[in-house]
Amino acid sequence: LAKTTQPISMDSYEGQEVNITCSHNNIATNDYITWYQQFPSQGPRFIIQGYKTKVTNEVASLFIPADRKSSTLSLPRVSLSDTAVYYCLVKAAGNKLTFGGGTRVLVKP
Amino acid sequence: DVKVTQSSRYLVKRTGEKVFLECVQDMDHENMFWYRQDPGLGLRLIYFSYDVKMKEKGDIPEGYSVSREKKERFSLILESASTNQTSMYLCASSLGTGGAETQYFGPGTRLLVL
């Protein structure tokens, strides 16, 4: 059965790097890993997407090991406005879209 | 910018009522999705559609139906609302070309069933 798991919560301080790992042991061979950010009372918003190795954009980096059974979202130098819930999304074998349970990140001053 | 809109931000309905949640996207996307979001359970897929008049069950379709008569519009229907359907409902769309598919979400509808 497809299982996508992430830590429930994570605390950090302003200026620190936050790393959130998602385990997806049944990811489909040809599918991408996508991460979303969600603020209260809003829909999730796309942050970053990757297939393998490392992807970087203006807000985050995504690290994917060779076996692709996990991925790590890295938020460099977080600020208070990065307080949100972060979700990973993968497509598992059988074409089944699966969100992780979400990681609540609290950034403290 | 992709825009996904949902007909209501908040809804209060009574048990047994028929409820319609509407979702519209303006980017000619092929795929549309309905999720529900509950504390501790994350996002769970109810139904999705990859073309007009086509639909596929997600993880939790029981108690729901959907309709996609036009490409831009995807409706979620609760035939007879029950209290356990109190939740946040999120609609999303994606381009539908296969491969890397980014989903764009609406703001959500918070439904309370009394």
Image (cartoon, rainbow, N blue to C red):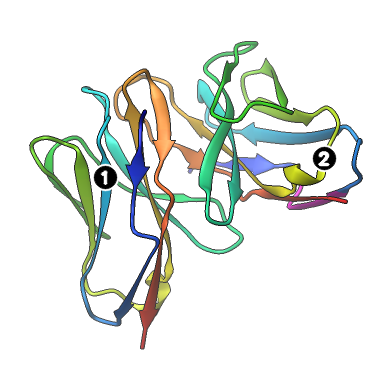
Residue A17: say if magenta: no
Name the residue rendered at 61%, 60% in the picture: A41
Give the CA separation, mark 2 to mark 1: 34 Å
Give above or below for B44 relative to A44: above
Name the residue rendered at 34%, 59% in the picture: A7
Crowding near pointer 1: few (<14 within 10 Å), some, many (20+)?
some
Q: Is residue A18 left or right of residue A1?
A: left
Name the residue rendered at 31%, 21% in the picture: A93
Give above or below for A72 relative to B62: below
Considering the whole magenta stretch, tell me its main secondary structure: strand
Q: Is residue A43 visible?
A: yes
- Picture quarter with the N terminus of chain A: top left
Give the total of numbered labels: 2
Quadrant of residue B5 within the rendered picture: top right
| Residue type highlighted by circle 1 | Ser
Q: Chain of mark 1?
A: A
Q: Is residue A37 left or right of residue A42?
A: left
Give above or below for A40 relative to B78: below
Q: Circle 2 sits on which residue?
A: B82
Instruction: Provide the secondary structure element on which disc 2 rests.
Output: loop
Q: Circle 1 sits on which residue?
A: A23
The magenta segment: B8-12
| Residue type highlighted by circle 2 | Ser
Tags 2 and 1 both on a single chain? no
Q: Chain of mark 2?
A: B
